[in-house]
Image: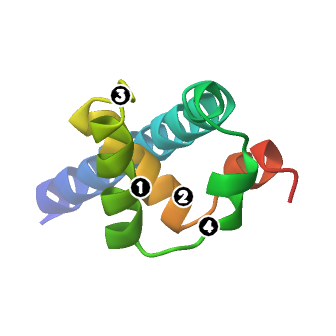
Amino acid sequence: MWRKNIIVLTSLMIAGLYLPQNQAMATDVCEKHLKTTCNSCHSNKEPCSQLGNSLKDWEEILSRMILNGAALSKKEVAAMAECLSQPSAAAKAACQK
C-alpha cells in the first residue's frame, strides 16, 4: 500500500514540475512573437485587440499569417493560440493591458 502511495505522489510531483514549464514556454513564445513576429508586419494593436478570442479563432488567424509569410512552426502556432486565447499576464503586459 505504501509503495502505491509513493508512486502516486512521485508521479504527481513530476507532473506538477512539468506543467508550469510548458505554460512558461507558451507564455515566452507568445510574448516573444507579439513583440517581434507580429510587429514585423503590423503593430500590436491588431493582435492585442483580439486577445481572448477562441483557440480556434487564433489558430485560423495564425494560419493566415503563415500564408502571408510569417515564419511560425506548428509548435509556436499552438503555443501562441493557447496564450492569446487565454490571455496570460505576459500577453497582457506585451499589449499594455
Q: Which residue is mark 3?
A: 69
In the rendered structure, which disc, 2 or 3, sits on the residue that comes first in sequence?
Answer: 3
Name the element at disc 1.
Answer: helix
The disc at residue 84 is 2
Of circles 4 and 3, the one toward us is 3
Corner quadrant of residue 72: top left
Of circles 2 and 3, the one toward us is 3
Q: In the image, what residue occupies the spot 63% across and 65% down? A: 51
In the rendered structure, which disc, 1 or 4, sits on the residue that comes first in sequence?
Answer: 4
Mark 2 and mark 1 in contact? Answer it, CB < 8 Å. Answer: yes
Corner quadrant of residue 1: bottom left
Whole-percent x, y for residue 82 in the image: 43, 58
Name the element at disc 3.
Answer: loop
Badge 4 density bin: few <14, some 14–19, many ≥20, Cα 10 Å: some
Q: Which residue is mark 1?
A: 81
The disc at residue 50 is 4
Amino acid found under the numbered disc labelled 4: Gln
Mark 1 and mark 4 in contact? Answer it, CB < 8 Å. Answer: no
The disc at residue 70 is none
Whole-percent x, y for residue 58 in the image: 41, 61
- Residue nearest the viewer, comparing 12 with 64: 64
